[in-house]
Amino acid sequence: MSGHMNAQGVTVGFGTSNFTAEVLGVTPPNLSRPDIDVTHLGTTKFKAFEPGDLVDGGECTLRIAYFPSDVPPIRGVAEVITITMPDSGATAVTFSGYCKGFAPGEMTEDSRVEATMTLKVAGEVSIDGTIIGD
């Protein structure tokens, strides 16, 4: 695959709270899995590791324009969150998640006020309906 994708047109949807905002930037979920240390007393030179089975969906962050009237779902339950890409197939990254953090940024003269929303992934992450890793 060659070329690149321009981020203009990315959308983020919240299935239950229907929260909306002017999205300025999105960092999709950062998945990880644990390392299991299998080093033993007979191991020499380097520690040995195996991959853990359970994937942590990590977090997703949104940089948004801050308007006090746009109240984030900071006390809401986990809901379906969908990030739709602007590619020709409108690829959708979907996960169950909740608003873990909300931080308005510095307010200065003649500048846009922004906020950062941190979303905790609370389950599986899928791309166009296929769970990552299946």
Image (cartoon, rainbow, N blue to C red):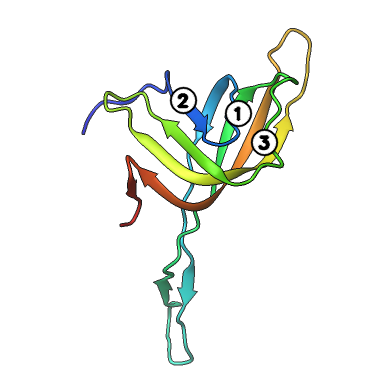
Is there CB contact under 8 Å for labels 2 and 1?
A: no
Q: Looking at the figure, which quarter contains the N terminus?
A: top left
Mark toward the start of the polypeptide (3 vs 1): 1
Residue drawn at (60%, 22%) of the image = 21
Comparing labels 3 and 2, the label whose residue is closer to the camera: 3
Residue carrying label 1: 19
Mark toward the start of the polypeptide (2 vs 1): 2
Q: How many labels sit on residues? A: 3
Q: Which numbered disc covers residue 11?
A: 2
In the image, residue 62 sits, relative to residue 69, either above or below, namely below
Estimate the x, y position of residue 118 in percent, counting from the top left.
62, 40
Disc 3 to disc 2, how far (Cα)?
Answer: 17 Å
Is there CB contact under 8 Å for labels 3 and 1?
A: yes
Q: Which numbered disc covers residue 31?
A: none
Q: Amino acid at mark 3?
A: Pro
Residue carrying label 3: 73
Disc 3 to disc 1, how far (Cα)?
Answer: 7 Å
Q: Residue furthest bottom?
A: 42
